[in-house]
Image (cartoon, coloured by chain):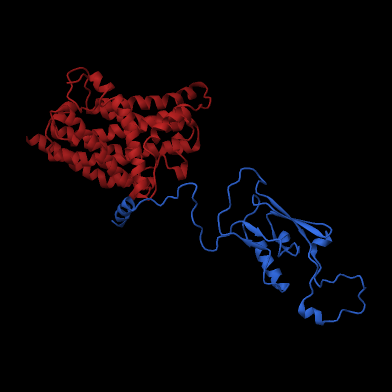
């Protein structure tokens, strides 16, 4: 049994999440490279990238705008790390547990920070990237929230602990499937890599960032990987009482999800923004509404 | 589905990345650095006049000329080589002084680093076999040049 603080700091919190973030970033880059017939980066590359960026200088930023630009990556890292710490991989013995709604809010904060950072930078590429991120966020979040609601409604609880312990129902699987459909957009992967489309708008909101600030953005992106795949892994994993086996299954499931997302990223090309919105609002929304209505119907019947 | 099959094949088929310092093979007809063979050069300077990138310099001297080539300025258009071939044919020779390598040009760090200059001694003019049968005009002075084609470099 672990306390909430240990969960936040050790597993699946910072001590696990930061190396896991670098590892998953490497897995994604390596898998895409191998599937495209390239060599790909060495194992330690994301870590060395981070260290090298930390050693560089940042451009001088003055005034409130500059202060905000420095603050956005830190807020993004903090919220993503908090989201990872909330995942109920190991059974907790007390303290703050949080719930699905808080986890969703923390998962959404990095995206909000990216939008704000792009507009704060004053760069045209940053502004276009932020506008795209905002539209993308509106597109996939409707489906994402409906999926979470359908899971909560089908299991009669918003508590993460309870959700991890309860056996999965068919409605929950539908919700998990809807979450999986939203993950590429949440992690800015192909075919929904619009906000950071390198060939069109360089790195979008990240264009004006360098040095330790960019390192923080990279870290927050890696932590988002861990939090988002960890959420799906928590909901998909069966309840296991043995703590080490539960942790092992959790990591293995995350790894499988990362591999699946990498395959999707290398097999697809970037979609236009209107096609992305149409995909989420026309195709996937129907699926999510079906999931939540079925979950509510089942709840009222029971 | 074909894209997934392709990804699967790529995954197990190894990578196609050429590791440094190896360089990829060039395609057929690739135009690389311009090679100069002083043995065949007659010093006509056609190449210099055809070079729009001003990568070729030609300085005529007494009894010799200096031919220089700067790959840093060269656009590898091949116009100099074409001119050299045409001119060589016109002269009735089969060999020509310029050709292009079929390998990527080397990496250089400073402008003019790869520049090469050749000082070539002018060869004594050789009369064409057909031209030898034609009698020189009577009005020509005795000290007129023997070559039927005056070298443009001499005018400079």
Judge by depth and name the residue closer to the eye, A19 or A302.
Answer: A19
Residue A7, picture quadrant: top left
Q: Is residue B26 above or below residue A86?
A: below
x 55%, y 54%: residue: B104
The quadrant the N terminus of chain B occupies is bottom left
**Residue B114, image x and y in percent?**
65, 49
User: Which chain shows up in red?
Assistant: A
**Residue A144, image x and y in percent?**
26, 37
Residue at the limit of the structure toward the left, as seen here? A302
Judge by depth and name the residue closer to the eye, A223 or A298.
Answer: A223
x 77%, y 80%: residue: B130
- Numbered circles on residues, count: 0
The quadrant the C terminus of chain B occupies is bottom right
Judge by depth and name the residue closer to the eye, A67 or A286.
Answer: A67
Q: Is residue A158 visible?
A: no
**Residue A249, image x and y in percent?**
19, 34
**Residue A37, image x and y in percent?**
37, 51
Horizontally, residue A105 falls left or right of residue B146, namely: left
Q: Is residue B154 above or below residue A284?
A: below
Which hue belongs to chain B?
blue
Residue A160, picture quadrant: top left
x 71%, y 65%: residue: B40
Q: Is residue A13 above or below residue B130?
A: above
Horizontally, residue B52 falls left or right of residue B28, namely: right
Q: Is residue A249 visible?
A: yes
Residue B58, picture quadrant: bottom right
Horizontally, residue A135 falls left or right of residue A163, namely: right
């Amino acid at each position: 049994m672990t306390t909430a603080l240990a969960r936040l700091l050790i597993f699946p919190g910072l001590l696990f999440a930061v190396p896991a973030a670098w590892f998953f970033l490497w897995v994604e880059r390596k898998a895409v490279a191998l599937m495209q017939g390239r060599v790909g980066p060495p194992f330690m590359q994301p870590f060395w990238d981070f260290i090298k960026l930390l050693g560089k200088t940042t451009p001088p930023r003055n005034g409130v705008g500059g202060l905000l630009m420095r603050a956005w990556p830190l807020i993004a890292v903090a919220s993503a790390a908090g989201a990872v710490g909330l995942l109920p991989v190991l059974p907790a013995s007390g303290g703050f547990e949080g719930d699905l709604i808080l986890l969703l809010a923390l998962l959404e904060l990095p995206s909000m920070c990216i939008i704000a950072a792009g507009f704060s930078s004053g760069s045209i590429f940053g502004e276009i990237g932020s506008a795209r991120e905002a539209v993308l966020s509106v597109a996939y979040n409707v489906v994402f929230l409906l999926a979470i609601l359908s899971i909560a409604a089908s299991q009669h609880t918003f508590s993460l602990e309870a959700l991890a312990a309860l056996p999965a129902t068919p409605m929950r699987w539908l919700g998990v499937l809807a979450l999986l459909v939203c993950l590429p957009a949440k992690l800015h992967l192909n075919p929904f890599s619009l906000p950071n489309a390198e060939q069109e708008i360089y790195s979008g909101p990240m264009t004006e960032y360098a040095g330790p600030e960019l390192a923080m953005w990279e870290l927050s992106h890696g932590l988002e990987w861990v939090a988002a795949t960890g959420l799906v892994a928590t909901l998909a994993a069966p309840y296991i009482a043995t703590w080490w086996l539960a942790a092992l299954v959790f990591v293995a499931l995350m790894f499988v999800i990362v591999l699946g997302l990498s395959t999707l990223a290398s097999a697809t090309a970037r979609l236009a923004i209107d096609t992305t919105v149409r995909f989420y609002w026309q195709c996937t929304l129907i699926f999510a509404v079906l999931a939540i209505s079925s979950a509510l119907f089942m709840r009222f019947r029971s | 589905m074909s894209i997934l099959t392709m990804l699967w094949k790529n995954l197990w088929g190894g990578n196609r990345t050429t590791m440094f310092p190896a360089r990829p093979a060039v395609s057929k007809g690739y135009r690389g650095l311009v090679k100069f063979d002083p043995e065949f050069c007659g010093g006509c300077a056609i190449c210099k006049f055809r070079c729009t990138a001003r990568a070729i310099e030609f300085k005529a001297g007494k009894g010799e000329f200096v031919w220089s080539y700067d790959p840093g300025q060269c656009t590898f258009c091949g116009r100099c080589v074409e001119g050299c071939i045409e001119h060589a044919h016109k002269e009735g020779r089969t060999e020509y002084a310029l050709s292009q390598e079929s390998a990527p040009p080397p990496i250089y760090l400073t402008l003019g680093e790869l520049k090469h200059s050749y000082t070539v001694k002018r060869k004594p003019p050789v009369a064409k076999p057909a031209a030898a049968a034609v009698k020189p005009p009577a009005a020509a002075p005795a000290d007129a040049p023997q070559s039927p084609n005056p070298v443009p470099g001499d005018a400079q």
